[in-house]
Amino acid sequence: MTGATHILAAAALYQRGGLKTPYLFVFAFLSHFLLDAVPHFDMELQWNYIPVACAGAYLLIVGKWQGDYKVLIAGLLGALPDIFLVLQPGSNFSVFHNLFHFKKLYPVSKTLLTAEMAFLIICVITLLYKKHRVLK
């Protein structure tokens, strides 16, 4: 799954969740493992930089527009497990992470790519709608 998908899904979960912020941050982090269990395409690291930068810039805009920059923190928490993998590839965390990860299939199904892009678009649209957050 692209880093952008993890980031935007975690941010949308934070924004739409009806729980207190600390719980939403935990769920944003855990959403990574749930998404990794779904069959998907994995991009090589170098191909993730631009989509991740675009997702981060989008969340900065959403945070400024909605007055809640915690949406960016939630997005980063959604990508954090993959960041750990890059920084410490042979760690115990890597082993834990790979327990949840979908086993890659090649060639990549166009259906999987289309489904992931549709999910990404849904997350982008979801983040456009302001939500009055009562719980902090």
Image (cartoon, rainbow, N blue to C red):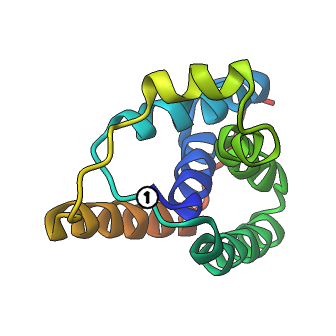
Q: Nearer the viewer, residue 38 or 106?
A: 106
In the rendered view of the protein, which quadrant contains the N terminus?
A: bottom left
Q: Position of residue 74 (x, y in %)?
A: 72, 44
The residue singled out by tag 1 in the image is 42
Secondary structure category for the residue under label 1: loop
Under mark 1, the amino acid is Asp
Q: Nearer the viewer, residue 57 or 47?
A: 47
The answer to whether any part of residue 135 appears in the image is no
Question: What residue do we see at 32% from left, 47% from top?
Answer: 104
Q: Is residue 89 above or below residue 106?
A: above
- Where, by quadrant of the figure, is residue 34 drawn? top left
Q: Nearer the viewer, residue 68 or 50?
A: 50
- Where, by quadrant of the figure, is residue 67 drawn? bottom right
Q: Position of residue 118 (x, y in %)?
A: 30, 67
From the viewer's perspective, is 45 left or right of 20?
left
From the viewer's perspective, is 114 left or right of 66?
left
Question: What residue do we see at 65% from left, 29% from top?
Answer: 94
